[in-house]
Image: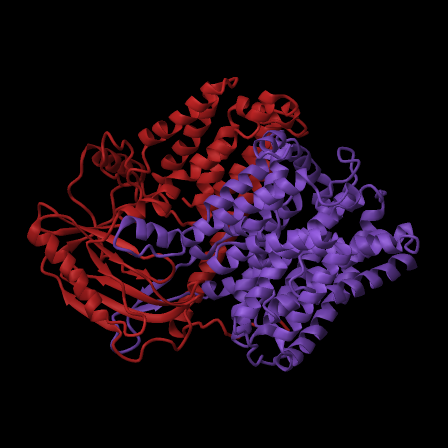
Chain colours: A red, B purple
Amino acid sequence: MKGFTHFMSGVAAATCVPEIVRMSTASRLDTVEGAASSLIILLPGIFGILPDTMDFKLGQFFSPGDVIVDPDPINTDPQKMAESFAEAVRRTGETGKPCKIQFYPIQLGGNLWRQYSLIFDEWEVKVQINEIVKTSQTPIPGTALKKNRLGVAKLPFPLKARTNEIDWMNSSIRKLRHLLKGPDAPPGPVKPSTLDILSGTQFEMKLENDGKIFFNWLPWHRTWSHSYVLGILLSLPVFLIAFLSGLYNWWIYGLAAILGFTVHITEDMTGHIGGSLLWPIHKTRSEGFEMFKASDPRTNFSINYTAILLILWNVDMYSIQIIPIPWWQYWTTFWLVPLGIYFWFVGKKKQELRLQDKMEQQEEPDGTGDLVVD
Amino acid sequence: MSTVLIYTLIGTLAGTILCMIPSLHIYNVMGFALLLYFNFKDLIPFEGMAPLFMSMMVAFAFINTIPMTFLAAADESAGATILPTLDMVMAGRGRDAAILTGMGVFFGGVLLVILSPFFYVVFPYVYKIIRTHLHWVIGLVIVFYVMSEWPKGAGRGDTTWKRFRDGWRNLGAGILTFTLSAIAGIILLTKPLAPADRSFQNIMPIFLGFFAFPSIIQMYLSEFKLPIQHKSRFVNAGWSDFSASLPAGLAGGLMAMTVPAVTIGIAAVFASHFTNHRAIQTTSYQPPKVPGTAVHLHTPEIYWQQERVFVIAGGIMKMMYYIGAFLLMFVLTDITPSGMGRGGLNVLLKPIFTPESGDYAIMCGVILFSSSLSMLALFGLTEVMIWLVPKLNVKILYAFITVLLFGILFFMGGGWMAIAVSLVTTCIGSIPVFFTCRRSHCMAVLLVPIMLSSSGNMDAIARFLGLL
């Protein structure tokens, strides 16, 4: 799920606790106690977004690459970049020690970036230099290099994208996933990876028992930061500060924080990468249930919309109670019907886009097509 | 009826002229509007007051697009539109950018009228529920707004500290801007420059400093030159772009209409997180088309559509924020007998103006009439601007505007003190310009004091800062 979804879900979950809503209601603001508790709902919001904040604003800087690929914007050399990848594979295979390779973006101006793709095969890696893109990730037609666009390097050890070495946590999650979704699809070719704007990407190579190199995408993401145990540890100061400040219902402050953190980690388990759920007790990063892609707009939108409705319903129910309709009418009118229409519309749109996409593949769009508003 | 029409015309005309001044923030325009009122209040009949202010705001929503597009004069709302429009201008498509934004604003006006049943039947309940919880709603806006800014640096460096510093360039600048703006807001709320009945005088120097002067400095430092703009009888957009813009425009607009101190720049961030559907069709890898390549990376049309959607949705938000927030003042229902308006103009007008039932329909008419006039003005002024800007020495123009703004500040905003305040806020407002963080961090000047006051914590913080 996306950051905003975690944020909204955390807040929505907190409003299900009647005391949290009561503590934050404006009618109590004329007391010192009321003023102190009035912002309690910020805690699930902050803790709801905290795991990703720790990863992207902190964790990634603590994960240096052993091999660095920082391409020259003027004379970009794809062959050298591919060979760097092969070097990381060689080091891992020969030493048996994990090796991280860091790729940086190629920035050409405030709003211009040179895009490149990494194409993986079992025994080969290719680096292809693409067009210049804007920060919106739309390519500028005609900006591809005229020559030297492709670098190819043979790998001394075979690559694989899914690990075989799974522990009790991952095997339990896999079993549960198979129960929920049926068996996994047979492994296909590894999807290429494309880099363009803002931050780079990192892979960690690890030699496994079968002699193959497992390359792990963003090894710093969803590890220590995505742990239920860490959530509890981080909320301890909240419990403590509330207790030492002598606040009424001091334990609810910590509970609100834990709620936000827990909702985030649980929601992330629906994706492809899970989290290090019990770090530091058990450090392995688990797989996810692979129900949705984290970026799927349908899931994110529907959860956010539901969260808004739930917040309004809870806040009303536990404070001023002015909604004049029963719960079933509220949820049918404002949730079931609109989301039904939304999914129908988005499904139709997706079909249209697929069809359009097929046509466009014959004639590439460039953003200056024949759309006109007269 | 003729009074309403006459004052709608006057308001639209005054707004159009005023909004051609680059870099003005909506709060500055409100300040001018009230100055106008205080100086001519004996001449303006009671029934002409609301149409006058409403039509000035409508004109602002349309016409400030022009300096923002062609003179790169970004105000705070620029966050919702400026990135793609600047790109479009540099590609010679400035006409598209201006007209599309205008069409978005017009669409927003029509939407406001269409949404009338929603405003009367559903919205009063939302308003009532949120009203007793506004302090934490604003708090959540602050939390997400600050925490959702991602590092713009790629984190280069051979030590953790260097990587961290590289990644945190914009984040540190953002947090610094936010903190300084918040402190400025707390100081100015506890020690106001002007009495409450002239509170717009407090706002004027702050907002000129945060938004207008840094844009002017940026303009002086940059080598902005307007490229030749293409002429076309058509706008490069499809009607489907308008339907795709609706969710973001509506979500951002409703948010900015409802939550105090949430401006378009902030609402646009939330709306895009909430409604962005680009990932519904992602890039795909196809067999190579060009010799010497391994794959063909296909970027679907929805990626390009985002640029147009961004501009149109930004226009819708502008209308809903500037006008919708004021229009809600006229929605009189059993549970909201005093209306639901919010925003500076609403607060400032409340003591001197009381809406009556039936005014809502008149205001809808004013919006549509003034929108039509403003849209026509936008067409004409866009052409004038495209013809004029290459002939202008933009730096001399900005020198003139700087003198004008300082003059306004001195004579109408509170003398030397106002100039001093504007210089301080200019320093704060320049941080985002030079460190490429979000400009809306400056809105902490209102967000934080409002949150603290409405949560009952303002006195404690002011005491802590030694202000009480």
How many marks on residues? Answer: 0
Q: Quadrant of the C terminus of chain A?
A: bottom right
User: Which residue occupies the foreground of this view, B279 or A232?
Assistant: A232
User: Which residue occupies the foreground of this view, B176 or A204?
Assistant: B176
Q: Residue at x 41, y 54 (%)?
A: B169
On the question of residue B79 being in view, the answer is yes
On the question of residue B365 being in view, the answer is no
Above/below status of B467 relative to A80: above
Q: Residue at x 52, y 70 (%)?
A: B222
Residue B208 place in picture, x, y as percent: 65, 57
Above/below status of A300 relative to B13: above
Q: Residue furthest front?
A: B416
Residue A285 place in picture, x, y as percent: 25, 39
User: Which residue occupies the foreground of this view, B66 or A247?
Assistant: A247
- Name the quadrant containing residue B386: bottom right
Residue A287 place in picture, x, y as percent: 27, 41
Q: Quadrant of the N terminus of chain A?
A: top left
Above/below status of B121 relative to A27: below
Residue B396 place in picture, x, y as percent: 64, 75
Q: Is residue B197 left or right of residue B285?
A: right
User: Which residue occupies the foreground of this view, B40 or A158?
Assistant: B40
Q: Is residue B265 left or right of residue A183?
A: right
